Amino acid sequence: MPMKFPSFRSRREDYPEKMWTRCPSCEEQLFNKQLEKAMNVCPSCGHHFRLSATMRLSQLLDDGSFVERDPGLVSVDPLGFVDQKPYPDRVAAAQLATGLRDAAVWGTGRIEGMRIAILVMDFGFMGGSMGAVVGEKVARAAEGALEEGIPLVIVSASGGARMQEGTLALMQLVKTMAALERLRAARVPYVSVMSDPTTGGVFASYAAMGDVNLAEPNALIGFAGARVGAGTIGQELPPGFQRSEFLYRHGFVDRIVQRADLRQELAQVLRFLAPTQPWGKEAARG
Amino acid sequence: MVDRILGRGREAREGHEGRGDQAPDAPAADPKAAVWARVQLARNLRRPRILELLAVIADEFVELHGDRLFGDDEAVVAGFARIEGRRVVVVGQQKGADTEENVRRSFGMPHPEGYRKAMRVMELAERCGLPVVTFVDVPGAHPGPESEERGIAEAIARSVGLMSRLRTPIVTVITGEGGSGGALAIAVGDVVLALENAVYSVISPEGCASILWRTTDEAPTAALAMRMTADDQRALGVVDLVIAEPGEGAHADHAETGRRLKTAITEQLDRLAAIPVEVLVEQRYRRYRSLGAYAELAGPAPTPPVPPRGGLADRLRGLIEAGQRAIPAPLPVGRRDEPPAREDV
Ligand SMILES: [Zn+2]
């Protein structure tokens, strides 16, 4: 099952050799420059390609407003995990491929002038999997938002918990949810944006729990792997199973938003969530 | 702080190699076989679960039913219990003794309504000032379409969040199989105990093997790599205390297993009862806040994409491999040829 080049190629600027990308949905050949201009959405069928963390930030935030926090966090290998390769080698390869230290980036920035804390995930880094670094960054982003009393936005793109960190990865579900519960108690708003894919432990923690949940069209969003599900239960899967529209129909997503509208919709929602009274620590202190 | 966290990991690794821990019938020389034997013990059909254990531990038990939203999931048992005079709320997963009961209890794999029942009862415990004791033994949350339709991920996330801030003591016992998110949803505690042959993992060894080794035949290898035994989990700091099982294992002696658990649980309940609730909740937050190993490098920008070691082909191969590791076989649904990442958790 070879990974198709386009989903990587189209988002990396460092392969000028190839100028075309084939849309995996409609098979149209797309000129890369044109694709990028269209925010990596296929102009002919609307297929939303995956975005790198960098590209996501630049699409959502006011120009030049992003200040990264905790860029130095890196994974270690608590279990000494080796499958067909040692875990540290996989991390190193992912760092080389993405230019990121791990699968999430967080910091502060502005969206239509409003200051927010924002965390974005990058599926290109080991499938966006959540280990201790991603969990720590989510917790720090929530704590940072709480400290400053600014809303938190998380854009998820993840296959779930990082198996190579075992139950320590599973514990990140608690770490992140505990931090979000404190944010909620202090009435600081949190908006979750789900992009393709948002599955497993990431969906079963912070991604599902926004005060407002937005999703990009046709993103894969679900808990159990469909293969696991179908295999274990021997049941036919309903059409569109675990897609954004399925989640929307069943009441777990507030709005499905085209990428071209995401920045504006996010800003609109955030303006409604703006406090009528002080936010965060200030409010919590009463 | 990093050192301390790293220390936990190192301890786990050394512990694993040094201790030669193995299940009774496994050859000492083969750690993989030893771990796999424990996985089998954890999954033993006669292993006592919440109802069997309460029969020994509790003087009184009143089961409560229903999530008040959709239905009653019999894969989760919840209610009031009295343990040597102490009133507590109990929650746990339950499998069936025969096929008929197993169908009724969805083979011990809870749907969202099971976790929502658990949450309702835990909130009741908080309001009444009763401590919570949870008994965890589950292969995983129910993976079927109904489970997804009714929001299994939302239920797990909400339950984890609730337990992280519940203003009453929580004692958790991993009694058998701690199967990823489906276990964690009722396993966030002030103290986490585990029976000696219990296992705890982020994904089933079969699931892990099929993703990372491309075959379920490597499940024992995956089980070893994930360090899922109770002792390893204690070394990692995920479990606080391991309780020895009698003789052949818990399945062979429910009564003695129950007695040992009862001693451990009452000790913890009494210890936690003495801690002011504000302190308790803050300690619980810190407990989970500190789990996980990472390092913090100085210096600003992350490593920029490094020039290729080989040619473009090598670099692309590297990218492809990087993308594959969390990505198992293609889905039976959807028409896109971008293979999405699928994991249990
Ligand atoms: Zn297209």
Image (spheres, coloured by chain):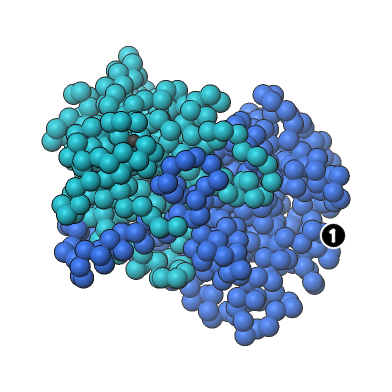
The quarter of the image holding the C terminus of chain A is top left
Q: Which quadrant of the figure shows ligand 1?
A: top left
Chain identifier matching the cyan colour in the rendered picture: A
The answer to whether residue A193 is left or right of residue A69 is right
Q: Would you say A216 lies left or right of B53 here?
A: left
Which residue appears farthest toward the top when viewing the image? Answer: A276
Residue at disc 1, secondary structure: helix
Quarter of the N terminus of chain A within the rendering: bottom left
- Judge whether residue B189 can be spotted in this image: no
Which amino acid, mark 1?
A: Ala
Residue drawn 84% across and 44% down? B101
Q: Position of residue A102 (x, y in %)?
A: 31, 54
Residue under the point 42% across and 23% down? A255
| Residue that carries the numbered disc 1 in the rendered image | B255
Residue A215 image offset from top left, x and y in percent: 40, 30
In the foreground, B337 or A213: B337
Rendering coords of residue B17 (x, y %): 53, 79
Q: Residue furthest left?
A: A64
